[in-house]
Image: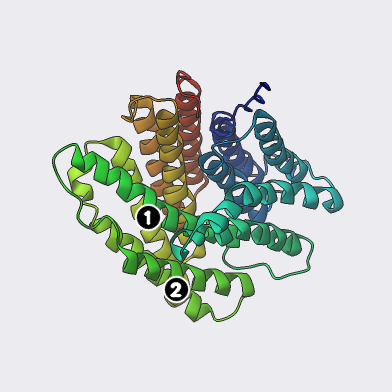
Amino acid sequence: MHASAPVPSVTSIHRLIYPAAAFHAALAVPLWLAAVGGLLPVEWSPALHAHEMTLGYALAVVGGFLMTRLSRRMVAVAFLSWLAGRLALLGGLPAAVAIPVGLAYPLLLFVVAGLPFLRTSRSGHNAVFGPLIGAFLLAEALFWASELGLGPANGLPVGLLLIATLLLTMGGRVIPAATAGALRRRGIALAQRVQPRLEAMGVVGALLCLVSAATGLLPPLGAAGAAMAGASALLRLARWKPLLLLRQPEIAALHLGYLCLGVGWLLTASTALLDLPPAAAWHMLGVGALGILASAMMIRTTLQREAEPERFPPAATIAVTLMAAAAVLRLAAVWSPSMALLAAAGACWTLSQLLTAAVLLTRPRRGKR
C-alpha cells in the first residue's frame, strides 16, 4: 500500500490581518491629523488618507473575513502583500515601484476570494460579490491615475463607495442571519429575513452611484442611485426588528452600523441634490458604517472561529460605543470646523481601534478554522 500524501494544513488569515488592520487604522488617523495640523513635515493628501482607510484598512478586514482556508504559506503571502502596499505608499516610493506593489493585495484577494464566487454561484444571487471584489483593482488603478495626473480627481472616492456597496450587500446577508439566530433563541421568528426586491433595489442603486463616481458623468443619476441604496438599507433594517435586540451588543452593533450605512448613502445623495458638504457623507460611511461594522465583524467572526460564545466582552461594547462617538464628533466637525472636534473624533477612533485589537489578540486559540 502506498502512504497517503499529507494533507496540507489550512488556516484563516484573520488572526494576523485583523489586529494589523486595527493597528493600522489606529495610527493612520492621528498621523493624518498631525499632518493637517502642520505637526508633521509630510505631504499626506486627502486622497491618500481616503485610500488608506478604504483600500488599506477596510480591504484588510474584507480579506480576513473572506480568506478562511489558506495554507500557511499563502497566509504569509497575503499578509506581506497587504503590508508591502502600505509601506510602499506611505514610504513615498517611486510610482514605478509603488503601483505594482499596491495592486498585489487587491489582485490576490480577487483570485483567492472573488473568483470562487463566480465559479460556484449557479445564479446571480452570490455572483455579484465576484465583480465587486475585482472592482477594488479598478479603484486602486483610478487612485494612481489621479495621483499621477492621468485622470480626474473624483468628487466621490470610488474605494469608499465600493466598500459601502460591499457592506450593503454582504451585510445584508450576514446581519439578518445573525439577527434571526438571536431572535430564534428567544422564541421569535424573523419572517422577513430575505428581502430580494429591496436587496436588488440597493444593488442597482449602489452600482449607478459607483458608475457615476468613477466616470464623473450624470451626477443626478448617481445621486438617485445613492438614494435607492440608502432607502434599501433602512427599509431592510426596519424589518429586522432591531428594537428587540438593543440589549445584545453583538447584534445591536451590527444594526447600528447598518443604520449608519443607510444614512451615509442618503447623505451621499443629498450631497448632489441639496448641496450638502460631501465630507458628511464620506465620514458617515467611513467612520459610522465602516468603523462600527468592521470592528463588530472582526470581533464577531473571531469569536466564532475560535469556538467561543458570540457574546461581546465588555471591551468590545466599549469599542463600538467609542466608534459611534467618533462618527458623531466627526460629523459635528463638518458643520462646525474645529481642531478640537477633529482631535476628539480622532481620539475616539484610535481608542476604539486599539480596544478592538486588544480583544482580538486576547482570544484563546481553540478553533483551527
- Nearer the observer, 292 or 139: 139
For the residues labelled 1 and 2, the Cα–Cα distance comes to 17 Å
- Residue depicted at x 38% and y 48%: 174
Q: Which residue is tagged 1?
A: 172
- Nearer the observer, 54 or 186: 186
Percent from the top left, x then y, of residue 132?
55, 60
Is disc 1 surrounded by few (<14), some (14 to 19) or many (20+) residues within 10 Å?
many
* Above or below for 122 versus 106: below
Left or right of 229? Residue 13 is: right
Q: Which element type, helix, strand or loop, lies under badge 2?
A: helix
- Residue depicted at x 74% and y 39%: 84
* Above or below for 312 versus 209: above
- Residue depicted at x 58% and y 48%: 113
Is disc 2 surrounded by few (<14), some (14 to 19) or many (20+) residues within 10 Å?
many
Q: Which element type, helix, strand or loop, lies under badge 1?
A: helix
Q: Which residue is tagged 2?
A: 225
Percent from the top left, x then y, of residue 56?
62, 45
**Number of on-image labels:** 2
Q: In which quadrant is the N terminus drawn?
A: top right
Q: Please state which amino acid type lies under the numbered disc 1.
A: Gly
Percent from the top left, x then y, of residue 141?
72, 60
- Nearer the observer, 126 or 204: 126
Left or right of 233? Residue 3 is: right
Q: Please state which amino acid type lies under the numbered disc 2.
A: Gly
Visual colour scheme:
rainbow
Q: Is residue 114 visible?
A: yes
